[in-house]
Image: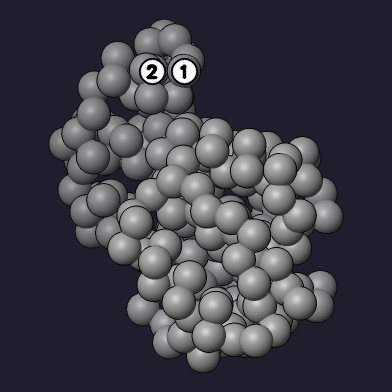
Amino acid sequence: MIRIFIADDHPIVRQGLRRIVEADPGLAISGEAGDADELLAGLDRAVTDLVLLDVSMPGGPFLENLQRLRAKHPTVRVLVLSVHPEDQWAVRALRAGASGYLTKDHSPDQLLEAIRRVYRGGKYVSPTLAEHLAKQLDGDVQRAPHELLSDREFEVMRRLGSGLTVSQIATELAISAKTVSTYRTRILEKMAVETNAELVRYAARYGLIG
């Protein structure tokens, strides 16, 4: 029996995932959470094999929450579910400790396949992402500017691209406004843009906001 914890801030999504899981006799629900703190607290109480983790769940930066989860519960495997395309989050999620990445437009059967592969100790990525990763290893693909950012820079860039102010970003990430400004300078330099407006256009073009 694979014990699964569902972590998503949308009750309708959690309900849908629960139905898919409970329809399979080899799977069981160990708990649910709507934010990162609730997830970590729930894992302390419930014996869990695998977490279905939403990228956009409240409670702090996604990658930091993923790293916290893996550090506190190293035996629990993580399958990331997201509305965001793979080229935005998948590689960063895998580096942060996730065992798989699945966009929410996949079928229930693909979700069940991913769950079982991750539970057995494998990695789950789509054929498209696997090909992209292979090309990166071979040096056959030119990386987009945002892929060159550190994880923290990427978090700040997405928020700048969404139109948030420096002070708003500082509050969301629990860092100083001065630190955010420093990140902003590095981001503009690495991405070869000069203004926030250019950054917003770039983020929109690559689908990095929302």
Residue 90 shows in the view: no
Kindly indicate whether the residue at mark 2 contacts the one at mark 1 (C-beta within 8 angstroms).
yes
Query: Which structural element holds mark 2?
Result: helix
Residue 170 x %, y %: 38, 18
Q: Which residue is mark 2?
A: 170
Instruction: Please name the residue that numbered disc 1 is placed on.
Output: 174
Q: Residue at the location (77% across, 39% down)?
A: 72
Three-letter code for the amino acid on which mark 2 is drawn: Ala
18 over 179 or under it: above or below:
below
Indicate the quadrant where residue 21 lies: bottom right
- x and y, in percent, of residue 209 in the image: 28, 49
Please tell me the numbered disc located at residue 21: none
Closest to the observer: 17 or 153? Answer: 17
Could you tell me which residue is drawn at 53 percent across and 85 percent down? Answer: 23
Q: Is residue 75 left or right of residue 41?
A: right
Q: Quadrant of residue 169?
A: top left
Colour treatment of the image = one colour
Which residue is rendered at x = 59% and y = 86% of the image? 24
User: How far apart in space, not on screen, are marks 1 and 2 (Cα)?
Assistant: 6 Å
Q: Amino acid at mark 1?
A: Ala
View extreme (bottom): residue: 109
Q: Secondary structure at mark 1?
A: loop
User: How many badges with numbers are in the image?
Assistant: 2
